[in-house]
Image (cartoon, rainbow, N blue to C red):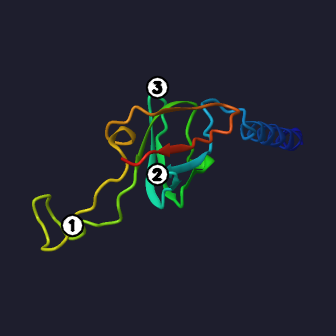
């Protein structure tokens, strides 16, 4: 009989611990949603890609597509607090589809060209900081070159 009385008490204790563990009491950094806009030459960037690369060794890196000037990295895939190097790509809409090598070419075909200046992508030194309790909205206005 004592064994039956202990089982419900033990079960209640285990369930209580499980519920406490799921209430945000876990250790480790919390991911944050990141949103914003990208303007190119004063207008919303029609389509492109934005990426956030850790600058402080934090264990998260992600990116998003830019559509009509807007981007969003949802919280479940979001970034841990810290500084991130930002890279933005926005081709001119041309495609190099079908070219197996850089040397290959199609007669009359013009390869796509990156519109965004290198200081916002391959040579980027643009850094933004994701902060606990902040909106983490980062807007960019990129001049045409």
Picture residue at 63% right of the left edge, 36% below the top: 30
State the residue in front, 2 or 93. 93
| Residue 26 place in picture, x, y as percent | 67, 33
Q: Which of the 4 image quarters holds residue 87? A: top left
Query: Distance from label 2 to label 1 (Cα)?
Result: 23 Å
- Contact between labelled residues 1 and 2, with CB atoms less than 8 Å apart: no
Q: Earlier in the sequence, mark 2 or mark 1?
A: 2
Residue extending furthest bottom? Answer: 107
State the residue in front, 69 or 128. 69
Q: Which residue matches tag 1? A: 110
Query: Distance from label 3 to label 1 (Cα)?
Result: 40 Å
State the residue in front, 2 or 29. 29
Q: Earlier in the sequence, mark 3 or mark 2?
A: 2
Q: Which element carries disc 1, helix, strand or loop?
A: loop
- Contact between labelled residues 2 and 3, with CB atoms less than 8 Å apart: no
Q: Which residue matches tag 2? A: 41
Q: Which residue matches tag 3? A: 56
**Left or right position of 119 against 127:** left
Mark 2 Cα shell of 10 Å, populated few (<14), some (14-19), many (≥20)? few
Q: Earlier in the sequence, mark 3 or mark 1?
A: 3
């Amino acid at each position: 009989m004592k064994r039956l009385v202990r089982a419900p008490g033990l079960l209640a204790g285990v369930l209580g611990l499980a519920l406490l563990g799921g209430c945000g009491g876990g250790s480790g950094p919390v991911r944050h949603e990141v949103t914003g806009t990208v303007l190119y030459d004063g207008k919303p960037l029609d389509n492109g890609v934005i990426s956030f690369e850790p600058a402080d060794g934090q264990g998260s890196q992600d990116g998003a597509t830019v559509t009509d000037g807007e981007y969003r990295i949802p919280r479940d895939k979001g970034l841990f607090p810290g500084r991130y190097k930002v890279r933005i790509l926005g081709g001119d809409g041309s495609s190099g589809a079908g070219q197996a090598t850089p040397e290959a070419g199609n007669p009359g075909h013009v390869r796509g060209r990156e519109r965004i200046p290198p200081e916002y992508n391959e040579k980027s030194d643009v850094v933004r900081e994701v902060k606990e309790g902040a909106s983490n909205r980062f807007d960019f206005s990129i001049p045409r070159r």
